[in-house]
Structure formats: structure tokens, C-alpha cells
Amino acid sequence: MIDHEERRLDGNAIGGLLREIFAMEMTAAVGTCAACGAVNVVGRVHVYIHAPGTVVRCPDCEAVLMRVVRGKGRYWIDMTGVRSLEFAAG
Ligand SMILES: [Zn+2]
């Protein structure tokens, strides 16, 4: 199903991007996959940086958790695949 294994990075690859968006460290944030219910820290998710944006997949079922596109001074974030996101208050 996934043929981009060689391009796969871990969640630390989106640490900087998420810090820009949420204005806090997010690699220790915990997300729940809407597809399979797996709970993983952001640092453990699978990240694919290609196409027009960044795709984050569940390490348990490979469903898309999050898609982030950045351009023209704006961010577009699709978090349909994340049932919940929990992180420490700043
Ligand atoms: Zn999943």
C-alpha cells in the first residue's frame, strides 16, 4: 500500500512546523488516530514530506492523520484523521 518507505521520516521531522503553528513544543503531544484509535506521541508518527505539503500517518494503521500545506504566508491544516490531540499547557 505504501511505496514511499525510503522517504518516511519520524514525527520529529514536523516538530518545527508544528511549533510554528501551535507556538509550543508539540513532539511530546499525544494524538489519537480517528481510524484505528491508536494513541501515539507526535514524535512517533510517520511523516512524508513530498507532494505539495506534509502528510502525517498513523504508525499503527498508516491512515492519514494530518496534512499540512504552507504557502503564500498561510497554513492549511487538515486534521480529519486525528480524533483528539492532547498536549501540556505552556
Ligand atoms: Zn491508526
Image (tube, rainbow, N blue to C red):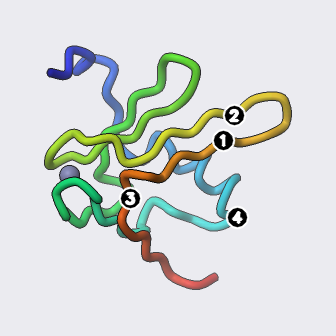
Q: Nearer the viewer, mark 4 or mark 2?
A: 2
At a point 51% along the width and 82% down the height, the residue shown is: 88
Q: How many discs appear?
A: 4
Q: Residues within 10 Å of mark 3 (few under 14, many from 20)?
A: many
Q: What is the C-alpha distance between the residues marked 1 and 3?
A: 15 Å
Distance CA(mark 3)–CA(mark 2): 19 Å
Which amino acid is tagged 2? Arg
Q: Earlier in the sequence, mark 3 or mark 2?
A: 2
Q: Closer to the camera: disc 3 or disc 4? A: 3
Closer to the eye: label 1 or 4: 1
Which quarter of the image is occupied by the N terminus? top left
Q: Residues within 10 Å of mark 4 (few under 14, many from 20)?
A: few
Instruction: Name the mark on residue 23.
Output: 4
Q: Which residue is mark 2?
A: 70
What's the mark number on residue 82?
3
Tell me the CA gap for discs 1 and 4. 16 Å
Give the x, y percent position of residue 16: 60, 47
Residue 76, which numbered label?
A: 1
Type of residue at label 3?
A: Val
